[in-house]
Amino acid sequence: MTESTERPAPSTGFWAISGLALVWNIIGIATYLMTVTMSPDALAALPEPERALHSSVPAWATGAYAIAVFAGTLGCIGLLLRRAWATPVLVLSLAGIAVQMGHAFFLSSMLEVMGATSAILPIVLIVIALYLVWFARSSAAKGWLR
């Protein structure tokens, strides 16, 4: 019996969601790399409150950011490869986002410096990460992942 007959074929939606999620997470990696490699000149060009906010981010929050985007990307690759390990890797990504956003919302002055609308993207990130964990679990329950 071949692998294709052992597992049900995923829907077109599975492939579309998994592919878009991979692109989303690759954009996250690009954003992370731009953040951690910001040149002194680019940092100096920021308004003082934003520069202070950027400079005050602790290494553990930056590490959580890295875990979030790299695990998210790996998890989406796992989805596209139809591997069950995608689920715990996406859970790890969600945990990284939770730590990073916990710092941003509760331990930094992000909302004061950037304004209330700066909360929109972090909330969207959390919702997407939660959805991807649910999606991976649902895909596994349908037999699409092994």
Image: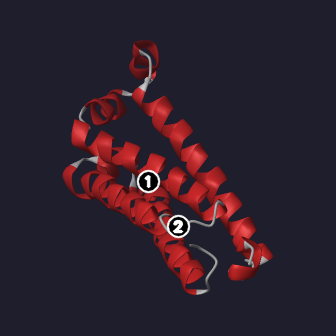
The residue identified by callout 1 is: 118
- On the question of residue 132 being in view, the answer is yes
On screen, residue 59 versus residue 23, left or right, reads: left
Quadrant of the image occupied by residue 47 = top left
- Label 2–label 1 contact, CB within 8 A: no
Give the class, few, some or many, for how many residues have Cα within 10 Å of label 1's Cα (few <14, many ≥20): some
- On the question of residue 58 being in view, the answer is no
Mark 2 or 1, nearer chain start: 1
Q: Amino acid at mark 2?
A: Ile
Q: Amino acid at mark 1?
A: Ser
Where's residue 22, x and y in %? 63, 54
Identified at 39% across, 52% down, the residue is 115
Where's residue 15, x and y in %? 73, 67
Residue 92 position (above or below residue 73): below
Q: Separation of disc 2 and disc 1 at Cα?
A: 17 Å
Quadrant of the image occupied by residue 40 = top left
On screen, residue 114 versus residue 143, left or right, reads: left
Residue sitting at the far right: 12
Where's residue 132, x and y in %? 53, 69
The residue identified by callout 2 is: 128
Where's residue 136, x and y in %? 54, 73
Q: Nearer the viewer, residue 141 or 66?
A: 141
Residue sitting at the far top: 41
Give the class, few, some or many, for how many residues have Cα within 10 Å of label 2's Cα (few <14, many ≥20): some
Query: Could you tell me which secondary element the residue under label 2 belongs to?
Result: helix
Residue 134 position (above or below residue 107): below
Quadrant of the image for the C terminus?
Answer: bottom right
Identified at 56% across, 65% down, the residue is 83
